[in-house]
Amino acid sequence: MSGAPKVDVVLHNAVVVTMDGTLRVLRDGAVAVAGDRIAAVGPSVDVLAAFPCAAQTIDLGGRIVLPGLVNTHVHTSQQLARGIADDVDLMTWLHGRIWPYESHMTEEDSYASTLLCGVELIRSGVTCFAEAGGQFVSEMARAVELLGLRACLTKSTMDCGDGLPPNWSSCSTDDCIQSQKELYEKHHNTADGRIRVWFGLRQIMNATDRLLLETRDVAQKLNTGIHMHIAEIPYENQLIVQTKGIDHGTVTYLEKIDFLRGNLLAAHSVWLNKHEIGHFSKAGVKVSHCPASAMRLLGFAPIKEMLDSGVCVSLGTDGAPSNNRMSIVDEMYVASLINKGREAYISGTTNPTALPAEAVLKMATINGAKAVLWDNEIGSLEVGKKADLVVVNPFKWCMVPLHDSIANIVYCMRTENIESVMCNGRWIMKDHKILNLNEDEVISSAVKRANDLLARAGINLPERMNYM
């Protein structure tokens, strides 16, 4: 026994949904964790026999073990703005609500916002997320380190465009590039390797060609990613056609200037034609599909066509003001339904197989890992990968009976079924309790800061919100 391998914990008597290359599901499975890595995945009897001296052995009583979910499009800085921009068009949303709000944020506001967002992410089973871009990356990093999450953080950069707040419009192309280089040097691969720094471009309407191409080159040199909102609304495409002299829109232009690369994460990507989907596929561009946000502000993205063309499509929630629910669990359910509905509308006949449960779960796990360029270490439960996992209690009214684990996860699971979450080999939520911070204090601080920030920004909300 003295020569037996040492592990920290063995989780056994579980339904283990591996999301590996063959999508194995072990009905009486176990996962062994040593340090920050997975040491074994297999039948309970085999794993227990291999590690008799585990520091801790936990009988999960038939609960489900999943890879940690990956949310590939999150605005942590917008969490305090939940509810300030409902039922308005995108340009009003940006120019009239969100940019005034974000431009008045302080560093401490950003920290409080990221903590609050992180709590919601953890409670929905997320262990890794891709930040879409904010102003205070150092504060995001401070919050992520405390939360225990894994993240790809980006600064939102804009060097041109209409409607920018005064304190943003003075940012030059050189400033945009240099500030991100400095953030990369300061924070990349910190927090025990859980934090990576990417380069961020808000959208093509706020980026010069020089910013686009220099961002492409610097990110490639540093071997990191680029996160950008792409082809969100018809107006965006129309503007690019008018100003750039091309025949369609953003993706066509980005392909023309040789911007598209395999390290590009294209958020939303709603208004693409067949040729542009081909450009994404050829270049290896990854897509973050945010179905709830798209339904509110943008439209129906051609997800089935992208998947059929070999594009890696993942799932994101977007930010609290454009979705309100920061739950990737909800996004799985919505993604499946709206894409089945879209297929019926386009073809004139129903096709329930348009986006099946296993495809949706892949989008939230291994495809998410590929989208954030981390699939060699996360996204599936395999020996040698990072110990990022989620324990789901299916024995609640919303998930029983459990005939098909994959289908029940996508179509039935709710955030309250998420019982425990481990990231990098450490529990960050155990038995529904967030471990690394005081959740009540986070909420109290966030509410106060949100109210103060709204007043500073001078945002005029519709009368229905001015309750007496």
Image: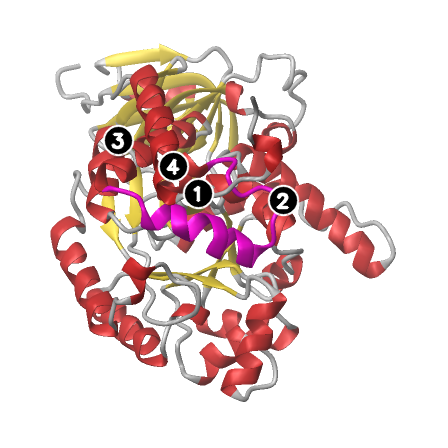
Q: CA distance from mark 4 to mark 2?
A: 21 Å
Q: Residues within 10 Å of mark 3 (few under 14, many from 20)?
A: many
Mark 2 residue type = Asp
What residue sits right under mark 2 in the picture?
Answer: 87
Quadrant that contains the N terminus: top left
Find the residue positioned furthest to the bottom.
245
Which residue bears the numbered disc 4?
455
In x, y percent, where is residue 80? 40, 35
User: Closer to the camera: disc 4 or disc 3?
Assistant: 4
Is the C-beta separation of discs 1 and 2 under 8 Å? Answer: no
The crowd level at tag 4 (other Cα within 10 Å; few <14, some 14-19, many 20+) is: few
Q: Residue at x 65, y 16 (%)?
A: 400
Q: Quadrant of residue 139?
A: top left
Q: Residues within 10 Å of mark 1 (few under 14, many from 20)?
A: many
Magenta range: 82-106
235 sits left or right of 150 in the view: right
